[in-house]
Amino acid sequence: MGWTGLKAAVLAGGGCRIEGELPPGAVARSTAGPGAGGAGAVFFSHGNRRVRVPLGADGPALLIVRDDGSAELSCGGERVEGRLEPVGLHCPRQAFITVSESCLFDCAYCPVPGSRGPRKTVEEIVGLVESVAGSVDAISLTSGVAVSIEEEEEYVCRVVGALRRFGLPIGVSIFPTPATPARLYALGVAEVKFNLETATPELFAAHCPGLPYGTVRDALAAAVPLFGRGHVFSNVLVGLGETDDELDACVDELVALGVVPVLRPLTPAARCRNLARPTPERLVRAARHLSRALGRAGLDPSGAVSMCGACTGCDLAAWRDL
């Protein structure tokens, strides 16, 4: 399967042994989502494809780093030559910033609520972008919910306003209110990602108590006419107990709206730490279904300019990896 099999095995494996010296600026660390607080990761690229490789000797992947800057990644019986990409902020070619590193809500798969991280000031965020502005193509913002959903939206909108002077496309992923799509569009945001997280409303209720599933779905539907087909995204975690049929139905529903599903393999963490990662075979099957769904809808995510749709390091992206 070549690249597809290799990437699926790395994403399902959860760790990588390193041989050789990692170059300066290669390690990225997460402050949001299920990967928050981990040992970090590196980004391995092969042509225009890339994969985020978590550091950790307990996983099945092996990365050999050479003095000339080249690298070799092997996993699941596959081996590919490539290189390590320098990280802008969090991922290559982007200033990807977590605004609030804490959250009032307690989603079962996410360690952020227990970390009680700080909220970055507007000035601090501007300074972070200034530090990498010459080496990135986009600014991406994500955030927990520090005070309330409405207050977080207001704060992130202030941040967006302060970042417009850089002249870079800005992508935003926050928990939305009904007004969020229109507010972000009016500020000149290029792309949005509102995360359904689970394949079914029932799983969402079980894993994200206190959060309204319908608000996210309505915000996605409202965002497509504003930002355009292929520029509205939604994470869907694979491995929370959904069946393949339920996952496929969620993908089909999102694609019919003009929304691009980002099929994110579960990282076992928080109260989901005892769940199994999805197998490589399941990730490939899901990506192939997504590819067919995108084709039927005439939906092309390859023009994404920010966030996960442009990076694709953490997911088996149907438009790039198959």
Image (spheres, grey):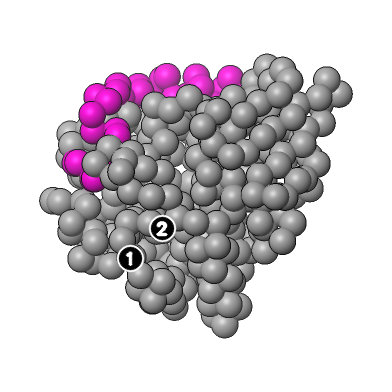
Q: For numbered disc 1, what is the local secondary structure? A: loop
User: Which residues make up the magenta segment?
Assistant: 105-134
Residue ID for mark 1? 242
Q: Tell me if residue 40 is in the magenta stretch.
A: no
- Marks 2 and 1: CB-CB under 8 Å? yes
* Residue type, numbered disc 1: Glu
Alpha-carbon neighbours of circle 1 within 10 Å: few (<14), some, or many (≥20)?
A: some
Tell me the distance, in whole angstroms, between the alpha carbons under discs 2 and 1: 8 Å
Looking at the rendering, which quadrant does residue 136 occupy?
top right
With 233 as the anchor, is 24 left or right in this view?
A: right
Give me the disc on residue 238: 2
Which quadrant of the figure contains the N terminus? bottom right
- The residue under the point 64% across, 63% down is 319
With 305 as the anchor, is 242 left or right in this view?
A: left
Q: Closest to the observer: 166 or 219?
A: 219
Residue 286 seen in this snapshot:
yes
Q: Residue at the bottom extreme? A: 296
**In the displayed structure, would residue 223 be above or below residue 59?**
below
- The residue under the point 38% across, 56% down is 239
